[in-house]
Amino acid sequence: MSEEQALIKTTSGDYTGKIVIGADGVNSLIAKAINPNKAAETMYRVSVRTYFSNVKDVIGHENLIEVHYLKDLIPGYFWIFHMHNNIKNVGLGMNEKTAIKYGVKLGKVLS
C-alpha cells in the first residue's frame, strides 16, 4: 500500500482507496476515528430532499449513489440516490451553523 492510499480494516475484509468518505451521519464512526476530540462536539445538519420519477438511469449507473460538492454549497453537498422504478432521491445538506451564518435556504437552492 502506498502513502497515497487509505486502508480500512473491517470484519468483512480490508479495503484500500485514495479517499475515505464517512457517509454514516452525524455520529460517524469515521469522524470519531480520525478526530475523536472534534467528534465529541455537538453538530447538527440541515437538509432537504425531493423525489423525481420517470428518470431513466444510464446503463451501469443503476446502483450508484452520487454525492456532489457545488461551489455555492461548500461546505455542504448535493446527492442523488438512485431508487427503484426510475425514482431518484435528490437532496442538499449542510452544517446548520454555516447555513444560518450565510443565510442559506436549502429549500430555495433546491427549487
Image: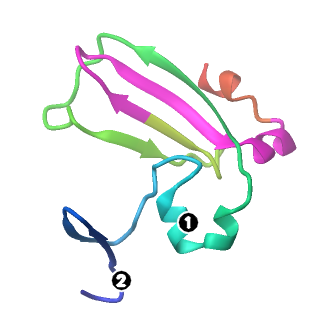
Question: Is disc 2 in contact with disc 1, using a CB cutoff of under 8 Å?
Answer: no
Residue that label 1 marks: 32
Q: What is the quadrant of the C terminus in the image? A: top right
Which of the 4 image quarters holds residue 49?
Answer: top right
Which of the 4 image quarters holds residue 62?
Answer: top left
**Is 54 inside the magenta-drawn segment?**
no
Q: Which of marks 2 and 1 is nearer the N terminus?
A: 2
Q: Identify the magenta region.
A: 80-103
Residue 83, horizontal then vertical, whole percent: 29, 24
Residue 22, horizontal then vertical, whole percent: 46, 57
Q: What is the quadrant of the N terminus in the image? A: bottom left
Residue that label 2 marks: 4
- What SS does tag 1 mark? helix
The residue nearer to you, when weighing 42 against 48, is: 42
**Is 90 inside the magenta-drawn segment?**
yes
Cα separation, mark 2 vs mark 1, equals 21 Å
Identity, as a three-letter code, of the amino acid under mark 1: Lys
Looking at the image, is 72 positioned above or below residue 7?
Answer: above
Identity, as a three-letter code, of the amino acid under mark 2: Glu
Q: Name which residue lies at 50% across and 18% down.
A: 50
Single out the residue that lies furthest toward the left: 59
Which of the 4 image quarters holds residue 35?
Answer: bottom right
Residue 90, horizontal then vertical, whole percent: 46, 26
Single out the residue that lies furthest toward the top: 54
